[in-house]
Amino acid sequence: MSKAQTKAERLQFTEEARKIVEQLSLEEKVSLMSGNIDIQGIPPEKISEVLGGMLASEADHYNVRPYAAGGLERFGIPPMNFCDGPRGVVCDNGKTTCFPVSMARGASFDPELEEEIGHAIGRETRAYGGNLFAGVCINMPYNPGWGRSQESYGEETNHIGAMGAALVRGVQAEDVMACVKHFAFNNMENARFKVSVTCDQRTEKEVYLPHFKDCIDAGAASVMSSYNRYNGVQCGHHHYLLKEVLKRDWDFDGFVMSDFCWGVKDTVEAANGGQDMEMLWTLEFGKKLVQAVRDGFVPEAVVDEAALRIVRTILAFDRGHKEYDMSVVGCQAHIDLARRAAREGITLVKNEGMLPLDRTKVKKIAVIGHLADKPNIGDYGSSRVRPAYVVTPLEGLRKATDAEILYADGKDLEEARKAAEAADAVVFVVGYNHDDEGEFVAVDDADNYLGAAGGDRKKSLGLHEEDIALLREVGPVNRNSTAVLIGGNMIMMTEWIDAVSSVLMAYYPGMEGGNVIAEILFGDVNPSGKLPFVVPVRESDLPYVDWEATDQYYEYYHGYTRLEKKGVAPLIPYGFGLSYTTFDIAKPQVDTEGAELVVRTEVSNTGSRDGAEVVQVYVGYGHSAVDRPVKQLSGFKRVEVPAGGTCPVEIRIPLEKLRYYEPSTRTWILEDMEYPVYVGSSEAEADQKCVTVHLK
């Protein structure tokens, strides 16, 4: 374990950091608090031009090398060297490992694997000269149309918190600071610079903040504030979020940095509000902050605290840190890990006997869809990674079989129909790419900032009309047809799902994705992913969002909890995923031990193939005195079970996770009542077994 992974270990550097800070001039202390690109004095109308030239050219793309902030050479303290993420390290030598996007990794429901990925990312960050990885993105989509939701793990707070905390532990075990983002309520892309999100206090405390606290409790060293406003206040200036919640209530010991370039709008408000570091550049801090202190608008004690937090954290991670050379970047071990992540995450949603394909019988395969032949690993925003290669679905299938491959891009329906008729099996590859969803910067904020279309899915949560027509008209031509879906979050299926025999949700599966899609289609790998989101029958079953709004209200319910509360059946339930084998989860036993709810059960593999199952525990609140979800995911465990074997499972849930927040008394309450505990393979009642426990 890294010596700096826990808060207690980092606090040992407090006195040394304090002695250093006491020797610094005001200017030196302030110099720690912003990026080392000073643009003060550049006319405002020229800033976008400067930024575009600095970040967007192919010769020198965004974060091609770590971005530095601060540093104290005379004390031997290096700067904070920033590397973005989360599907890998954005710094680039043309061979960086590209993992599946976080949403795909969320579908693995495997925190142990995510921690391993954190180790790999930490090693590659250090190899590039970085000491901070800003790729722990845990914003929870209020609506799956959010363009950057591919960077997070799903729609459920407890699941996101567990996966994010695992990434934090893995990254920091390699002496790399993990930065958790974007704090908070950053769930809209196109309007992120102007929208003010509002919600009631129970929604804030129970729905949108717990996963951030999970990552802080796991020891995260840094937090990035977000562009949006919360209750009318800029999140980068937000005294309540940054100083009261994060630093006081959660006792966060690290430092807060702003989201890049426009995360700080006002020198005084940001400094007094708890912002410790302005990134990527020096614009509102620097000389302006020095003057604000001298004029009495910002107490020097505020600067002292920020400097102490920054120096202490860097000392803890830098002293005797692990070192790696470029041989670890894109190494075979990391590529193998990326392939494993795709294997565990890709989710079989429907299978009417078509899969797995039989190599002895399938001699001709029609591969249809323009995305089949394109490298497609996610958006082109700040998370973009440039690996040495990307295996497309078409390439993966060609390598996996000696069968004849008939490829059609799907634009000509008659051509596609003929290919389907001539084949023994059909594989459609449909969905999205970086132009459909991802990070977005409006032209009036920064011309050519990142050079991507992206943004929120404003028109529809379904496939493009041409893809729907392709599936509906060509899918029924051949009964052995499967749709492989590419995308960063939920894709509506109602219009076309009956036209194909099977559906595979591949997300953006990373550099090895094409190989893994083929492995699953042919049964070389048994699918085991579970949907980290619900698929509704109608888009209207989900909360409405105006993606261009200046004000957006978040309700208490979203996703599967909203559907259950309204009594609306989903098309595909949250946590659902098929396998090529079958499992039986025994009736669980539930006890309390100290401050934990302990669920024990056994999982039996009743089929003929080795496989993995995700045991999911949902706690019900039907007896609550206040409005609460029908039930909510509270714990989960992924287990590998050999064919014919049985595996014991124990899941421990902190009782504090079962409390609700009472705004009138500002307290958390564990109700004295009977709690139904549902244990199964998804959130659907048909997939669960229920026992009750009395808690008080």
Image (tube, rainbow, N blue to C red):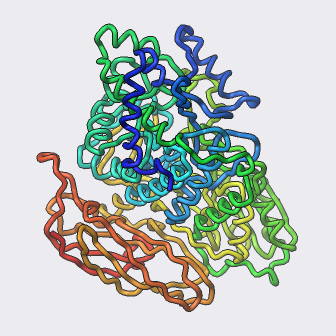
Residue 619 placement: quadrant = bottom left
Give above or below for 587 relative to 368. Answer: below
- Give residue 222's position: percent from left, percent from top: 44, 40
Decide which of 189, 69 is in the foreground and name it: 69
**Residue 333 in view of the camera:** yes
Give above or below for 422 relative to 22. Answer: below
Question: In the visual, does 276 lie left or right of 300?
Answer: right
The quarter of the image holding the C terminus is: bottom left
- Give residue 292's position: percent from left, percent from top: 35, 12
**Residue 234 in view of the camera:** no
- Give residue 125's position: percent from left, percent from top: 62, 44
Residue in the image at 78% along x and 68% along y: 420
Question: In the visual, does 125 lie left or right of 369?
Answer: left
Residue in the image at 78% along x and 63% along y: 396
Residue in the image at 52% along x and 29% along y: 260
Decide which of 62, 446 is in the foreground and name it: 62
- Give residue 613's position: percent from left, percent from top: 51, 76
Residue 22 placement: quadrant = top left
Decide which of 384, 192 is in the foreground and name it: 384
Give above or below for 674 relative to 543. Answer: below
Q: How many labels does the image show?
A: 0
Decide which of 149, 571 is in the foreground and name it: 149
Residue in the image at 76% along x and 81% along y: 358
Give above or below for 22 relative to 679. Answer: above
